[in-house]
Amino acid sequence: MFVTRSFLSITLLCVFATTAVTLPAVAQERSNRRTLDGHSFLTTSTVGDPFVGTYVATLTAAGRALNMQVPVYDLDGNQLAILDGNIAFLQLGFTYQQQVVKWLALRLNVTGAARMGTNHVSLLAEGATAVYGGTFGAVFRLVQSRKLFLSALAELRGNSLYAISPLSFAQGVIDGGGIDSTTQLLGTGDNRRIVGGVRAAYAFAPWFGVTGLAEFGPAKRFFEDETGDRDGTTFEAGGTASFDLSPVTRVPLGFVGSFLYQSENERGDDLVGKQTVLGLGVFYTGRREFQIGMELNFQRLDQRGLDNKINASQIKLLLRYDF
């Protein structure tokens, strides 16, 4: 309850402050909103949009991951079996972007997520994990026409992880011959990324538009991988296709499909590597400056250190207001 009230208070405060300070300037630059040629693009939390306007957005999500594999070893290190486990997770997110000048916007994003095993296998192996972090970056407008918007992106991303794994703790006790100062139940880690790339949006008609992005940069994982290395490179590519029924049927309803490939999972690189995400969202489109709706995501993730694919799904509630 405390987290919910605090989250709501921050959102309302940012809305009030931004309205009071920036609304007159932005009102003169309507073209900087997420509308091109009469089409108001439906944005998702999976694939970021290229626009440089001022907005505030929130995310609430819950999901489940299936088919996680847990190898079981004997005291000599020989693998005895592989067991299957499932994980449930929750996520909260808040984003505020401020347009500084016509061609530049600064963005701040904060997120918090938690995951936990839901059967005896995953509860022992995965236990409970909390991840929180944020992103700070800048969006630069490169090209803008009646139908096209192209921008460049530079961001610094980071997360902190706290994990309790009973199985890892027991293995540490066995390997160390008992409990001492080096035996830990709580594992901690941090990851960092510096990302740059380009994003684009194109409106084919008032009822249909597409977006795309390509981003890459150096990445440092939470923990060392099976080769003993924490450093890597992240690459992301994706896009959306949004359909707005209101220009054609006067029904204030829109649909957006999304796709994202990510070579390094951002908040779960301790457990998984690359991922592919497919999404489908339904949104209210009665007001161009306001967006609210539900999105369903399906994820296919490579489990780190094993030749195994994890299937995950999550449902999201998204709210966004453009000033």
Image (tube, rainbow, N blue to C red):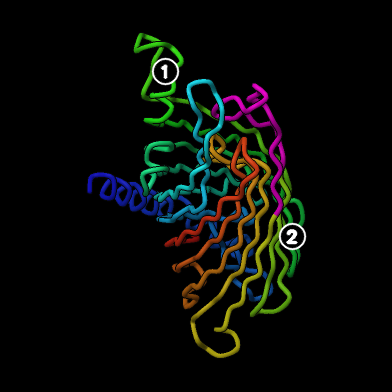
Helix, strand or loop status at disc 1: helix
Of mark 2 and mark 1, the one earlier in the sequence is 2
Residue lying at 37% horizontally and 49% vertically, measured from the top left:
118
> What's the magenta region?
216-237
Query: Percent position (x, y) of residue 312?
Result: 52, 55
Helix, strand or loop status at disc 2: strand
Q: Looking at the picture, does residue 149 appear above or below residue 90? A: below
Residue lying at 52% horizontally and 88% vertically, measured from the top left:
250
Q: Of discs 2 and 1, which sits in the foreground?
A: 1
Residues 173 and 190: in front is: 173
Left or right, 83 with respect to 232, comes to left
Label at residue 10: none
Q: Circle 1 sits on which residue? A: 174
Q: Looking at the picture, does residue 186 appear above or below residue 159? A: above
The amino acid type of the residue labelled 2 equals: Gln
Query: Percent position (x, y) of residue 237?
Result: 71, 52
Q: Is residue 314 magenta?
A: no
Q: Looking at the picture, does residue 245 appear above or below residue 174? A: below
Query: Percent position (x, y) of residue 34?
Result: 60, 64
The amino acid type of the residue labelled 1 equals: Ile
Label at residue 144: 2
Residue lying at 42% horizontally and 44% vertically, measured from the top left:
113
Q: Is residue 231 magenta?
A: yes
Query: Percent position (x, y) of residue 15?
Result: 39, 54
